Image (cartoon, rainbow, N blue to C red):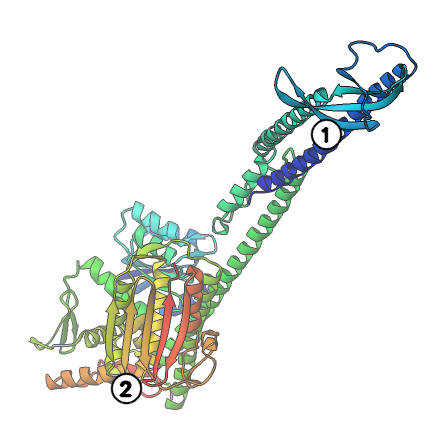
Amino acid sequence: MKILIVEDEPALRSSLVEYLRQDGYVCEAAENYRAAHEKIKLYTYDCILLDLTLPDGNGLDLVRTLKADSSRAGVLILSARDSLDDKVLGLELGADDYLAKPFHLAELNARLKAIIRRRQFQGQRQLQFRDLCVFPDQGLVSVRDEPLPLTRMEYDLLLFFLANPNRVLTKESIAEHLWGDDADTADSFDFIYTHLKNLRKKMQEKGVDNYIRTMYGMGYKLSTE
Amino acid sequence: MKLLTTTNRYYLLLATLVFAVGSVVLYFGISLALRIEVDEQLQNQQREIMRGSRLKAGLLDVVALSTEPQPAGLRDTMLLDPTENVLVPYRQLSFRVEGDGMPQWVTLRKSLLETEDMVGLVLTVMLTVLGLLLLSLGWLNRWLSRRIWRPFEHTLAALRRYDLQHQSELALPVHTPIDEFTELNQALLHMSQRLVADYQSLKDFTENAAHETRTPLAIMQAKLEQLLQAEELRPATAALVGDLYSATVRLARLHHALTLLSKIENRQFPQAVPLQLEQVVENRLRMLQDFIDDKELVVTKQVQGGPARQMHPALADSLVGNLLQNAIKHNHRGGTLHWTLTAEYLSVSNTGPAVAGEPTRFFERFRKLNPSSESPGLGLSIVQQICRYYGYSVRYTFSAPDSTHTLRVEFGH
């Protein structure tokens, strides 16, 4: 999996590169429009993380270039502007998803995986994690070929963990992943706990170990061990 | 009333007044002059008769001789015109003549009919002139309004069309034939240039501030997230990093709310589409289902349709979302949430403990009903700003017997 990260802010660029490399991606980075344009023209990527406001150009023009070259690369826009118009324009031009800054790395990772899944395998893919098998297209989960019935929230939660195995997921990022803007409506952290409790119970009933660990003071982690 | 009509009224009123006074003065002036003239003629005749000369024929209309004493002097009288059979005004002068033995009284008369005709003529002329003057004034003003006021009408139309959203200056001619309008246009142009510059700089500032703070926030969040992944983190340190991370997320949320508020204030949401609010509320309630279930809230609704509202989708969603979040957040377990939508208003009621304080202050920024809450207390400010943006009004009421809080958005038109 080859990914191009177009981001002019060095600190953020290095974080993105490091975070995604740990997931086994091959990451390349471009710090401005010119460099990004050159790389797009020379190489092919599976997905491009694209900052819209670049010092020497607009990221949207890169989306246009990609479309003009009928590139197969997925595009995930990262923007410091969260105006609806930018979002609509970006998606209309053919970007796959849009994430406003600041974002959670875990959320970015989950969305990136969803894009790659849709692009490369036309959705025909199953996610295997130890005894768990997930069919994202059908929204089904099975444990050793036995179906594991989950509520929508539990399923979304599990998929979020599967996108970020072995990483600490903060309660905040989980809340925003599940409820978006409504995350701060009530005590959403209690809900996470409730959904997690149910998920763990259902997995245990199917004889699966407790994969999801509580990391004190930080959040939760899907453990591979 | 139009400026032209107003000035016209004054012009016409003054002209009529002047003409009325003029007519009266002229009438009496001419009557008096004619009367004096007739009197003089009569007295001249008298003098001639007294001197003994013969009466000149043709000069006077009637001469009457009488042996009966007549009151001497000048008088008005009416005599019957035998041919036309009407009474005609006459001026007469009677005096005594010492003739051959018997004293005689001579009465000289002269018709005043010509004077009457004269006065009639004068009045006719005056009224005709008045009428002509009024007509020509009206016509002149209409012509002036079309010609001289044209730049003004043009300016007015340009002002009416003017929309700051388009960020263009007023399209007005700098020079017009009328100095006042030229000055007006120049002042307006100057003002619009300043407005556009102010608006642009405010917009730039908001956008830049939003952009420039988002990036460090994104860095902070990303680095903290990376730090949390570090294996060697001791539990105490992990808790610290966790707290920092929460604070960063809160800051990001606050930033988002404040940017939204300033964007609404800067009117940066020009595009509106017809929206069925019922759909917006239903969608949002579905997204909030978890929170509703958790508090075991009973949601009821009363919808009487109403036309689609012209709103920006993001603002409509934000308005509805904040109202519903508020109703859920400040509700108690097993409480109710009731929403009503009619053509006139959208209201959301919820049960909950009474809150102290002035209801209008709930809409202030950073006003928290629950001080320990993590939310920055901007929800109702956003609701109010969105209402203001669309010319709606929002009211809060509390009904003590069933302890129900109601927020009602009245569309007003």
Give residue B116's quadrant in the image. top right
Does residue A184 appear in the picture of this structure? no
Q: Quick one: label 2 or label 1, which is nearer the N terminus? A: 1
State whether discs 2 and 1 lie on one chain: yes
What's under tag 1, amino acid-wise? Answer: Tyr
Left or right for A83, reference B167: left
Residue A166 figure quarter: bottom left
Q: Position of residue B316 (x, y in %)?
A: 35, 63
Mark 2 and mark 1: Cα distance apart in space: 96 Å
Q: Is residue B277 left or right of residue B75?
A: left
Q: Nearer the viewer, residue A76 or B325?
A: B325
Q: What amino acid does circle 2 point to?
A: Arg
Between residue B319 and residue B21, name the one nearer to us: B21
Q: Which mark is residue B27?
A: 1
Camera-nearest label, 2 or 1: 1
Q: Chain of mark 1?
A: B
- Check if mark 2's residue and mark 1's residue have beta carbons within 8 Å: no
Q: Residue furthest front?
A: B101
Residue B282: give x, y in percent of width and height: 25, 67
Label 2: few (<14), some (14–19) or many (≥20) C-alpha neighbours in 10 Å? some
Placement of the N terminus of chain A among the 4 image quadrants = bottom left
> Who's the residue at 61% across and 50% down the image?
B191
Closer to the camera in the image, B333 or A67 = B333
Residue at (8% x, 77% y) in the render = A144
Mark number for residue B19? none
State the SS at label 1. Answer: helix
* Chain that bears disc 2: B
What residue would you read off at disc 2? B333
| Residue under the point 29% across and 66% down | B341
